Image (tube, rainbow, N blue to C red):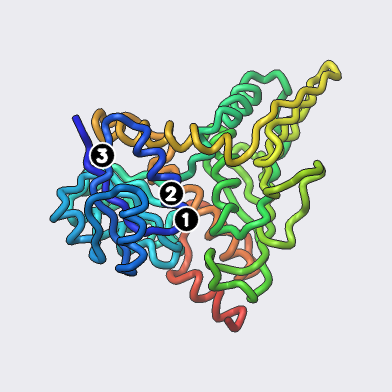
């Protein structure tokens, strides 16, 4: 069966989706939509896509699209996702984060489920070979019990911060969070490509008591290794050893017997096969209803964590899960910072 793919948004990140869908036999990219007509036609011509539209609804109906990608800035992503659900597509792969405010994420998740639409969020780090290797080592018990995790991103919570928190959730077997305490600062780049404060820090505690210490934004701690092109990393400190993942470095492993191992791997080389595997998993879920590591339900738990850290910084309170906060969190943050 061939799936007809429509692309929503012509930003740079869409190129990775084009490459991935072209690598999957069952997929044919038939159309692209973007509000900027000139950009849309140029993107279609560059990638050999036969049809270009300025309307998402028109693209889905006229080009008979059954799977879409949604690649826009976070503050604009809700409406095209909802339009795709309401127009009856079978599957949606949307870029992270899972919306801006938690009520938007909940609406997208619930509407997709009610419509029978497969909705995935592009947390493709879960499909890194290195991520699976790190998870297997942690779950084997070879390094003992996890004492704490740490995740660092030089880009905001709603940028790569969502990847690093989601990455740790994957490593820790999707265990739910119990509570969060966070803080934030900085308004200079609030409405840049990624929405939100310039810097966030905090702690998220899993229900089993294991803490995850988080930093996100341009003032975040730097990787201790040279050649750090992308300052994004996750660390698991255990009772008998330690394992560290860096997006520019691969794995660093300290074993109980004193051995030290490095497993090389860096972005973008590790990203391309992961994106293809995620795309293949989307097709499998659409066709067979199989569970998916990037399903909206899993992404919702990560989005709760992002919002809990911001809500805590706004209210100076410890926030418990499941999240129950006032709506329009980001607007309240904006007002607090006088943006």
User: Measuring 55% from the left and 57% from the top, which residue is drawn there?
Assistant: 159
Helix, strand or loop for disc 2: helix
Residue 31 percent location from the top left of the image: 25, 52
Residue 18 point in image, percent of width and height:
38, 44
Kindly tell me whether residue 175 is visible in this rendering.
Answer: no
CA gap, disc 1 and disc 2: 6 Å
SS type, badge 3 = strand
Residue picked out by circle 3: 28
Between residue 132 and residue 52, name the one nearer to us: 52
* Residue 217, image x, y percentages: 67, 60
Residue 15: mark: 2
Q: Is residue 325 left or right of residue 83?
A: right
Determine the secondary structure under disc 1. loop
Quarter that holds the N terminus: top left
Which quadrant of the rendered structure holds the C terminus?
Answer: bottom right
- Kindly report the distance in space between the C-alpha atoms of the residues bearing marks 3 and 2: 15 Å
Q: Measuring 83% from the left and 16% from the top, which residue is drawn there?
A: 257
- Marks 1 and 2 close (CB-CB < 8 Å): yes
């Amino acid at each position: 069966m061939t799936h007809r793919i429509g692309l929503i948004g012509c930003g740079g990140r869409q190129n990775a989706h084009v490459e991935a869908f072209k690598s999957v036999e069952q997929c044919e990219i038939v159309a692209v939509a973007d509000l900027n007509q000139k950009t849309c036609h140029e993107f279609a011509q560059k990638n050999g896509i036969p049809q270009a539209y300025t309307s998402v609804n028109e693209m889905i109906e006229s080009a008979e699209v059954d799977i879409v990608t949604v690649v826009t800035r976070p503050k604009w992503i809700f409406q095209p996702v909802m339009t795709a659900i309401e127009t009856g597509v079978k599957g949606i792969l949307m870029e992270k984060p899972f919306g801006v405010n938690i009520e938007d994420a909940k609406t997208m998740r619930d509407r997709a489920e009610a419509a029978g639409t497969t909705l995935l969020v592009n947390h493709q780090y879960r499909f890194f070979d290195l991520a699976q290797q790190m998870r297997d080592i942690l779950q084997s018990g070879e390094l003992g019990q996890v004492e704490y995790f740490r995740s660092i991103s030089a880009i905001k919570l709603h940028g790569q911060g969502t990847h690093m928190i989601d990455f740790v959730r994957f490593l820790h077997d999707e265990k739910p969070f119990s509570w969060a305490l966070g803080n934030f600062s900085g308004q200079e780049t609030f409405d840049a490509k990624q929405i939100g404060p310039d810097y966030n820090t905090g702690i998220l505690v899993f229900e089993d008591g294991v803490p995850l210490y988080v930093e996100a934004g341009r003032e975040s701690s730097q990787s201790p290794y040279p050649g750090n092109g992308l300052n994004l990393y996750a660390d698991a400190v255990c009772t008998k050893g330690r394992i560290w993942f860096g997006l520019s470095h691969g794995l660093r492993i300290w074993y109980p017997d004193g051995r030290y191992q490095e497993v090389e791997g860096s972005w973008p080389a590790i990203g391309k096969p992961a994106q293809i595997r995620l795309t293949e998993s989307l097709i499998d879920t659409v066709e067979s209803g199989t569970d998916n590591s990037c399903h909206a339900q899993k992404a919702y738990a990560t989005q709760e964590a992002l919002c809990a850290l911001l809500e805590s910084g706004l209210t100076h309170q410890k926030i418990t899960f499941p999240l129950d906060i006032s709506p329009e969190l980001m607007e309240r943050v904006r007002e607090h910072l006088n943006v």
